Image: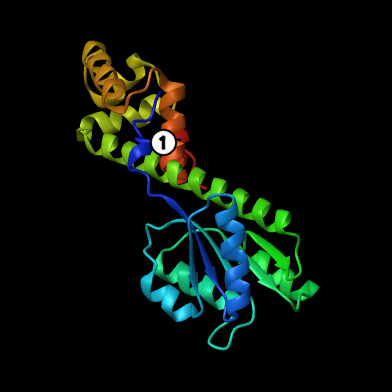
Amino acid sequence: MESRVDPQNMPQSIVYVIDDHPQELLLIRRLCESVNLEVQTFDSPDDFLKQVDPKSAGCVVVDLLMPQMSGLDVQTRMLALGVTMPIIVVTGHADTGTCRTAFKKGVFDFLEKGFEPHDLLTSIQRALEANEQHREKESQRGVAMAQLDALTQREVEVMRQLAQGNSLKEIAGASGISVQTASKHRCNIFRKLDVNNEVDLLKLLISIDPEYASLATGSTA
């Protein structure tokens, strides 16, 4: 199975930096530009949140303690807006409890100010790669959902039985159709979903939604 995802249509990755200290913004901007990374800086989290698009690609580097809101509050607001870019929190006041809270909230990385430039750039690169993988997966999911929408109601019924491992004879008996008709539905399903066999079909369903996997396997959990 090969996904039809065009990398040319993927948005450019940008490093978004939020810090109320101009010198910190300048430092991180220069670090990013030194390795040819696209970067945008904000001295106000509100300005960033007003401008960020849910479809934005890249990562966010944010100060933990700012007058308007904390870096963790920025993450909460981002999630509410549907922005899923990885977040790297930097702070000059790190403690175990704060770090634990940050990672529980899904923060990608947590760095103390005074960090080595290499450490920040490494973290940013990892975050950009993670975001790219996430966006590619979501794009593939969108393609798969569109393919599923092309199935008829009967083909959906047959698809689920195929994913359960039922034979064409079993499908024909359960659906009140001939084996030949069941075979025709199977061919149409594989063609429309761009899969070669039942294993690929099940993998596709699982990649779309875990609920599909439970339906396919007959699980009621």
Residue 69 in percent (x, y) is at 55, 84
State the residue at coordinates (42%, 78%): 47
- Out of 129 and 43, give the one closest to the viewer: 43
- Foreground residue, 89 or 213? 89
Task: Report whether residue 36 is seen.
Answer: yes
**Residue 187, percent across and down?**
27, 17
Left or right: 97 in relation to 1: right
Q: State the image coordinates of residue 136 (x, y, percent, origin top left).
A: 44, 41
Q: Residues within 10 Å of mark 1 (few under 14, many from 20)?
A: many
The mark tally for this picture is 1
Q: Which is more toward the observer, 21 or 178? A: 21
Q: How is the image coloured?
A: rainbow
- Give the residue at the far right of this rendering: 96
Residue furthest bottom in the image: 67
The residue type indicated by label 1 comes to Leu
- Mark 1 — residue? 205
Report the side of 138 relative to 67 (left or right): left
Q: Quadrant of the rendered structure where residue 95 is?
A: bottom right
Q: Quadrant of residue 212?
A: top left
User: Does any portion of residue 63 appear in the rendered image?
Assistant: no
For the N terminus, the quadrant is: top left
Q: What secondary structure is marked by label 1?
A: helix
Residue 168 location (% of width, % of height): 34, 15
Identified at 67% across, 70% down, the residue is 90
Q: Is residue 83 left or right of residue 174?
A: right
